[in-house]
Image (cartoon, grey):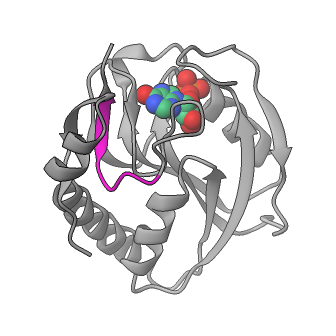
Amino acid sequence: MQYDDADICQRDPLIERVLIGSDEIQRRVQQLGTEISRDYAGSTPVLVNILKGAFVFLADLTRGMSAPHEIDFMAISSYHGGTQSTGVVKIEKDLKTDITGRDVIIVEDIVDTGLTLSHLLDLLQTRGPRSLRVCTLLDKSSRRQKEVPIHYRGFEIPDEFVIGYGLDYDEKYRNLPFIGVLKP
Ligand code: IMP
């Protein structure tokens, strides 16, 4: 699908600029799909999608993968509106799949402080997966408070609050086809 990022941007006065364009995202997500398919040839990994922010990423990633795989969803909250982390991490929805002995890939929208992911990795590890890796679309590594292993990374981004391609500000902007920055 082709999008006119500049036009969408112009029509919303609260969006400051496009940080990563829709074409660039599509290309990179396809590359990640190819890479993961190659790495997991002969296995059927479970892609664990973290709602809600990573749902758009998963939708493109899964279609970019040639290797067989399953998907499941988990919802964890660490942000409750606004742009600041509350430090509270809560499981809102758990997996249906038994991941014991399975190859698991966590599909995240963004790793910021790393607190959410670190909590999630500890939790999933207790269920005895055969392997556990992380695939994130965005990495804001300059904000890291907790070191977390990232195996697949779409883009490294600066310390700015971003929206679009699944990421929200107060539940809005998830539908943007690009990653953008809001006006201060
Ligand atoms: P962390 O625990 O600080 O790594 O935060 C992870 C979660 O915070 C992500 O899954 C997002 O839901 C949210 N988040 C962090 N940075 C941003 C941002 O720039 N825009 C939108 N959501 C963000």
**For residue 126, what is the image quadrant?**
top right
Q: Where is residue 20 in the image (x, y as percent from the top left)?
A: 21, 44
111 and 130: which is toward the camera:
111
In the image: residue 155, left or right of residue 66: left
Q: Where is residue 137 in the image (x, y as percent from the top left)?
A: 39, 48
Is residue 125 something that shows in the picture? Answer: no
Q: Measuring 52% from the left and 13% from the top, which residue is drawn there?
A: 145
**For residue 132, what is the image quadrant?**
bottom right
Q: Measuring 50% from the left and 64% from the top, which residue is drawn there?
A: 58
159 and 162: which is toward the camera:
162
Q: Position of residue 165 (x, y in %)?
A: 40, 51
Figure check: 53 above or below 98: above
Q: State yes or no: residue 133 in magenta.
A: no
What segment carries the magenta color? 175-181
Figure check: 79 above or below 176: above
Quadrant assignment for the C terminus: top left
140 and 15: which is toward the camera:
15
Q: Where is residue 63 in the image (x, y as percent from the top left)?
A: 42, 80
- Label count reads 0
Q: Measuring 53% from the left and 40% from the top, which residue is drawn there?
A: 172
Quadrant assignment for the N terminus: bottom left
In the image: residue 141, left or right of residue 105: left
